[in-house]
């Protein structure tokens, strides 16, 4: 009986409040405003949570779209003589294909650093394929399993990449000598070349792995030792190796042909 009276009181109280609000413009406006604010906050929170969990899918879609764009950019094609290629005749033939991959492991503070990617042999990945990211050069594929691949990072003492100064076209070699994960050395640039701090360093295109023009970094500092014919050049890397999530593995569709030709040139 006591609960009956209590619930009856709540019903009558709710009815009275409703009648009061409905018949008073100011109170009704206050309640509607408060309700709208609460509803807006709730839906805003729900939207934020939904967007957060959708980021992974969005990032993967963007990576795939970027790979498709890279496949079709001018630098991915080699110009050929259309008099030679008659069937499916075209002036340009695709030379580079870009495959997206996610980084599942990455080291930056060891003497020899590697990345592990979630793409392997069954995805068409092979040893000695170049790896880049939106920031620039990442490294070279060193080992491949069925579903994964290991990449010898640019932050590895055995990694050597042909590079050039964009402003002057002089070619050298990029190498990491340990220490900071943000700095490499550009070697073999002769001292007669006019250098500037801030000069852009890119891939030369002389390698069968990397296309020409991939960003590596900018000249940080340079020095000439006594009796030395080459600069000692430090380069600030454009790739942030502490923050790599997605990469592009580059498949040079003409790699075998180029390597065969190079081997034939080495024969006595």
Image (cartoon, rainbow, N blue to C red):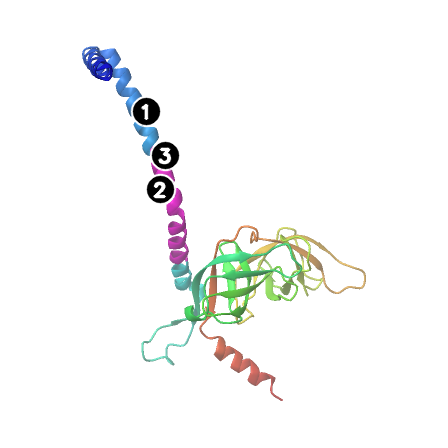
Going by the picture, which residue comes out furthest to the right?
A: 226
Main secondary structure along the magenta-highlighted residues: helix
93 above or below 29? below
Does residue 185 belong to the magenta stretch? no
User: Considering only order in the chain, which callout, 2 or 1, is on the residue closer to the N terminus?
Assistant: 1
> Residue 58: percent from the left, percent from the top?
38, 50
User: Considering only order in the chain, which callout, 1 or 3, is on the residue closer to the N terminus?
Assistant: 1
Query: Where on the picture, by quarter, is residue 142?
Result: bottom right
Q: Residues in magenta?
A: 44-66
Disc 3 to disc 1, how far (Cα)? 12 Å
Does residue 59 belong to the magenta stretch? yes
Numbered mark located on residue 45 in the image: 3
Q: What element carries label 2?
A: helix
Residue 169 appears in the figure = no
Q: Where, quadrant-wise, is the N terminus in this rendering?
A: top left
Question: Dot 2 corresponds to which residue?
Answer: 50
Disc 1 to disc 2, how far (Cα)? 20 Å
Query: Where on the picture, by quarter, is residue 17?
Result: top left
Density class for disc 2 (Cα within 10 Å; few <14, some 14-19, many ≥20) is: few
């Amino acid at each position: 009986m006591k609960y009956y009276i209590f619930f009856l009181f709540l019903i009558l109280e709710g009815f009275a409040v409703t009648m009061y609000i409905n018949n008073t413009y100011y109170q009704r406006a206050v309640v509607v405003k408060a309700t709208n604010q609460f509803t807006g906050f709730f839906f805003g929170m729900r939207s934020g949570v939904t967007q957060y969990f959708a980021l992974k899918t969005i990032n993967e879609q963007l990576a795939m779209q970027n790979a498709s764009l890279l496949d079709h950019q001018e630098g991915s094609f080699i110009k050929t003589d259309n008099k030679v290629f008659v069937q499916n005749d075209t002036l340009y033939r695709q030379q580079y294909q870009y495959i997206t991959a996610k980084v599942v492991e990455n080291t930056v503070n060891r003497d020899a650093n590697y990345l592990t990617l979630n793409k392997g042999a069954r995805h068409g990945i092979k040893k000695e394929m170049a790896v880049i990211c939106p920031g620039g050069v990442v490294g070279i594929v060193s080992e491949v399993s069925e579903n994964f691949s290991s990449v010898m990072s640019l932050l590895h003492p055995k990694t050597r990449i042909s590079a050039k100064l964009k402003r002057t076209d002089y070619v050298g070699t990029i190498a990491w000598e340990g220490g900071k994960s943000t700095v490499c050395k550009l070697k073999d640039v002769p001292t007669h070349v006019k250098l500037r701090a801030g000069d852009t360093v890119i891939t030369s295109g002389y390698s069968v792995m990397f296309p020409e023009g991939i960003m590596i970094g900018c000249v940080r500092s340079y020095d000439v030792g006594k009796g030395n014919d080459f600069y000692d050049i430090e380069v600030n890397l454009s790739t942030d190796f502490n923050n790599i999530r997605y990469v592009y593995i580059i498949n040079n569709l003409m790699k075998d042909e180029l390597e065969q030709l190079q081997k034939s040139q080495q024969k006595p």
